[in-house]
Amino acid sequence: MFFTSSVEAQKNKRDSIAYRLKRLESTNRFNSKDTTHIKLLSNLASTYRYINNDSLYSISNRVLKLSEAVNFTYGKIRANEALGYYYSDKGDRQKSTILLKKALKLAVNEEDKRSELNIINGLANDYRDDGNFAEALNLNLKGIDVAKQIDSKPMLSIFNENIASLYADQKDFDNALVFYDTVQVINKALGNEQIHAETQSNMASLYKDSEDFDLAMFNINKSINSFENLKIYDWLAYAYQVKGSIYLKQKKYQWALYWYDQSNLLHDQQLDDDREKIQLLNGMAKVYLGLGRDSLSLEHASLGLQLSEKIKSLQGQIDCSETLYELYKNKEDHTKALAYLETFTKLSDSLSKDKNKQSLSLLRAKMQYEQEKQDLIATNEVALAKQRNYIYFSITILIILAVITFIVRRSEHIQKKLNKELQEKSEVVSERESQLNEINKTKTKLFSIIGHDLRGPIGALQGILKLFTDGEIGKNEFISFIPKLKSDVENISFALNNLLSWGQTQLNGVVTKPKRISLDKLVSGNISLLSEVAAGKSIKIINQLPENPLIWADQNQIDIVIRNLMSNAIKFTPEDGLITIEAEEKRDVWQIMIRDTGIGMNKEIQKKIFADTTNITTYGTNNERGTGLGLSLCKEMILKNNGEIWVESVLRKGSSFYFTVPKAEKRYQKLAS
C-alpha cells in the first residue's frame, strides 16, 4: 500500500500539468504553437525521466518541433536538454553530448543562467559516466562560477557534491568529506529536506566504501525517513539499494536481500532507470551468491551484464563480470570462470587507463592555480585601495605642491612595483602549471605502459600461482607452465629496465658520464646475454667488429642501446635468421650497424619509430611483447652521448639500425686517467 501511494504521489505533479494542458487545449483561442502550451509540454516531459523514457522522448520531440516552428528559444533549450537526457539514460552518450552542448549554446546566447546550470550538470554527469573525470571536473568548476553569479545555492550544493563524488570514486575519502562539509553548510542555509536527504544518501554510500558502517547506517536511515515522508520514490529506491549494499558489505545477506527487494519493488512498479537497475541486479546477485543460491545469483548477474552492454555501462560490465567470475569459480566451472576473469581484467584496465589519476592531479593543480590567482588579485586590490587613499589625501590637503607631487610619484612607483611582482608571480604560476602538465604526461604514459604491458603478464603469473596454491591445477600441469612463466618474467624484467631508464630521462634524473670503454666488450656481453633467446628461434648472431674499437661514452647508456637494438632484431627476425654487428671508423666517430634478416618495415613506420610523440608497440614473429619505449630510449641515450641514430629497412628483407658515438681519442684518454 505504501508503494502504491508513493507512486500516486509522484504522479500528482504530472497529473496537475496534464490537467492544465487539457484546460488550455479546450479553450476557443487555443493554439498549439502558443509559448504557454509549449512550456507546459516541456514541464510534462521532464516528469517522465526515470519513469517512462519513451514518453520523455515523444513529448520532447513534439516540444522541439513546435518551438522550431515559432522560433521559441526557451522551448528549443528544454527539448534538446530532455532529448540529451533520454540518450544518456539509453547509454548513447555521443548523441547525448551533442544535444546537451546544443542546448548549452542556446542557453548561453539567451543568457538563461538557470537552464545553463542544469545543462552543465547533465554534461558533467555524462563525462563522469564515460570516465572522462578531467572534463567532468572542469564543467563542475564552471558550474560553481555560474551558480555564484546568480546566487543559486541549490546548484552550488549540487556541483560541490559532484566534485566530492569524483574524490569518492578515487577512494580519496578525506578530500571527499571536505567538499561534503561545504555541501552541508549550503544545505543548512537552504533548509530543504529533500536536498539534505539526497546528500545524506550519497554520504552513506561514501561511508560504506570507507567501511565506517555506523555513520553509513545513520545517514541512510535519515535519508530513507525523509524520502518516505516526501514520497520521492526514485531517490527512495536508490536509498533502499544503498542500505542493502551496506548490509552486503558486512555479509549480512538476509538483511541485504530485504532492502534490495524493497528497491526492486519500486523499480518494477514505475521506475525506468537502467543505470541504478544494473547496480541493484549485481548487488542481489552477490547476496544470492553469499546465501548459496547460485541459480538466482546467475540469473541476476546475467541480467545485469546484458543491461550494462545495452546502455554501454563500462562500470556495470566490470561489476557483473566480476560477480559471474566468482559464481563460476564457486561452481568449479574453471573455463567460464577464467573467461569472465579475462573480461573483468580487460575492462578494468580500459577504465583505469590514464584518466583517473590524471583527473585528480588536474583538480589539485586547478585549485592551487585558482587560489594563487585570487591571492594576487586580493593583493592588487589592497594596493589600489592604498593608492586611492594617497590620491584622496593629496587632494584634501592641497597645502604644498611638493607634497602632492611626492605622493603621486610614490603611488606610481608602488603601482609599477606591484605590477612587476604580479607579472613575476604570474610567470611562476604558469611555469609551475607547465611543469605539472609535463609530469602528468610522463606519469600517464608510465601508468599506461604498466597497466597495458606489465599488468597482463603479472596478472597471468598471479592467476596461475593462485590456481596452483588453491589446488585447482596439479604439480605436473603447473610445471608445464614454467617455460612460459620464465619467458614472461624475462620480458617483464627487460621492460622494467627500459621503463625505469626512460622514466629517469623524462624526470631529468639521468646524468651522462662518458669514459673510455671497449665497444667489443659491450657487444660480446650482450651477445652472451641474448644468446639463449636467439637460440630459441635458431637465429645466428655474428660479431664482425674490428679489433678493439674504443669509444668515449657512458657505458651504461650505450649498453642499453645495444641491448635494445639486438633484442628488437631477435624479436622481428623469423627462425633460422641472421643478425650481424659491424662497426666502421669515421673521422671523429665510430659508426655501428646492427643488421637483421627480419620482416622489415615500410617507409611510414621508419619515419615514426624515433619520433618523440610516438609510442609504437608491435608483436614479434613469435608474438613477443614490448613497451614501445625501446627505440625512444635508444634515441635519447645516443643524443646524450653526442651521436646520431637512424634506420634503413626493406619489407620482408630486413632492417639495419645505425648509430654513431665519439671515438676515444688521446685527449679523452688523458681526461679519463
Image (spheres, rainbow, N blue to C red):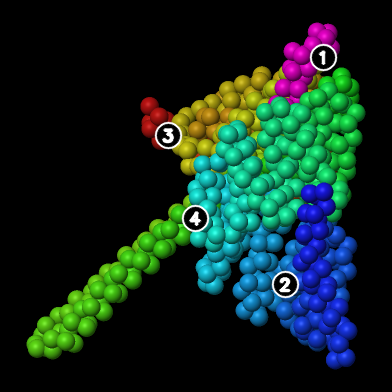
Give the residue displayed 71% in from the left and 27% down from the top: 252
Kindly report which numbered mark, 2 or 3, lies closer to the viewer in this rendering. Answer: 2
Secondary structure category for the residue under label 1 = loop
The residue carrying mark 3 is: 668
Circle 2: residue type: Ala
Asked if labels 2 and 4 touch by Cβ distance under 8 angstroms, the answer is no
Where residue 103 sits in the image (x, y, percent)? Answer: 72, 72
**Residue drawn at (83%, 74%) of the image:** 19
Label 4 sits on residue: 185
Instruction: Find the residue positioned furthest to the front.
Output: 1
Kindly indicate whether the residue at mark 4 contacts the one at mark 1 (C-beta within 8 angstroms).
no
Secondary structure mostly seen in magenta is: helix
Residue that label 2 marks: 103
Disc 4 is placed on an element classified as: helix
Q: Of the residues shown, which amino acid type is indicated by label 1? A: Glu
Residue at point 79%, 71% (across, down): 16
Is residue 468 among what the camera can see?
Answer: yes
- The quadrant of the rendering that contains the C terminus is top left
| Side of 340 relative to 74 (left or right) | right
In front: 596, or 400? 400
